[in-house]
Amino acid sequence: MAKPSAESASPRKPGRPKAPPGPDNGRTRIVRSAARLFREKGFRAATVRELAEAAGMQSGSLFYFFRNKEEILVAVMEEGMADVHAAVAAAQASGGPVAAFRLMAQRHLEGILDRDADHMTVMLYETRALPSAAERHVRQLRRDYEAMWEAQIDALIAVGCWRGAESPRLSRMALMGAMNWAVQWFRPDRGDTIEALVDTLAQLFLKESE
C-alpha cells in the first residue's frame, strides 16, 4: 500500500517555511526513530519533544511531515506491515507448501523478534492507541496479511500436511497467536533461536514433510 506523501500527510499552512531538502525530507528518519521510541517507552508515554530529539530535529519540524503523533504511529505500523508482508509473500512463492510455510514462519518471526524489529512490535501492542478510522485501516492491513497465511494453510490442507484441517480459521488464529506471543518470552541470551522456533511450529502444525 502506497504511503502518503509528506505533502498530503501534512499540508503546509500559508507562510510556513518549506521543509528541509533531502530525498525523504526527514520522514523516514522520523518513522524509524519513532518506532524505536514507541517500542521502548510506549506510544502514550513518548512525547513530541522526545520524538523530535530521537529524529535529530526541532519539535516543530515533525509537523512538516505529520499532523500529529497518531499519524506517526500509523506510518510506523504501515512501514512494519509492508516490510513483513513483502518478505513473507516472497517466502510463500519460494517452493512447495511445506518448505514455503517454514520460510514464511521464519520471515514473520524475524520481523517481530530481531533486535531492530521495532515497527512490528509497535504494531502488536499499540493498535488500540489509534483513532477509530486509523485503527480500521491498520486492522485491514492485518487482515490482508493474514489472508496470505490462510491461503498457505489451504495449500497445506490440499496436500494433507496440515493439522487441524477441520477448522482452518482456528488453526490460523492459533498459529498467529503462537508466533506473535513469542515477543513476550523469546530470549536469544538464553539460547532461543528463530530456527528452533520454526522447527517447533512445524512440529505443532504440520503432519509430515513433503
Image (tube, rainbow, N blue to C red):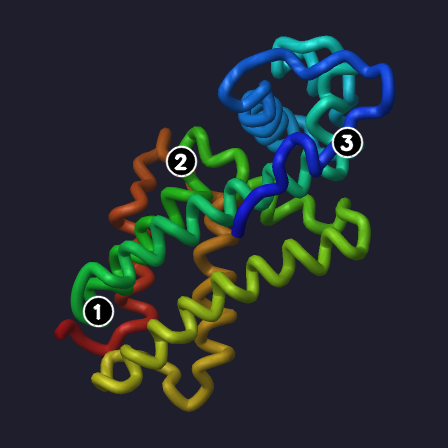
Assign a secondary structure to mark 2: loop
Q: Which residue lies furthest to the front in this view?
A: 14
Q: Mark 2 points at which residue?
A: 114
How far across and down, in percent of the image, does residue 43 sit? 72, 34
How far across and down, in percent of the image, does residue 195 sit? 25, 47
Q: Residue 11 carries which label?
A: 3
Left/right placement of residue 84 relative to residue 208 reads right
How far across and down, in percent of the image, does residue 147 sit? 47, 70
**Nearer the N terminus, badge 1 or badge 3?**
3
**Nearer the N terminus, badge 1 or badge 2?**
1
Assign a secondary structure to mark 1: helix
Q: Which dot, 1 or 3, sits closer to the camera?
A: 3
Q: Which mark is residue 20?
A: none
Assign a secondary structure to mark 3: loop
Residue flagged by tag 3: what amino acid is it? Pro
Q: Which of 194 and 69 is in front in this view?
A: 69
Left/right placement of residue 160 relative to residue 57 reads left
Residue flagged by tag 2: what amino acid is it? Asp
Separation of residues labelled 2 and 3 (CA atoms): 35 Å
Circles 1 and 2, Cβ within 8 Å, touching? The answer is no
Q: Residues within 10 Å of mark 2 (few under 14, many from 20)?
A: few
Q: In which quarter of the image is residue 18?
A: top right
Q: Which dot, 2 or 3, sits closer to the camera?
A: 3
Circles 2 and 3, Cβ within 8 Å, touching? The answer is no
Residue flagged by tag 1: what amino acid is it? Val
Q: Mark 1 points at which residue?
A: 98
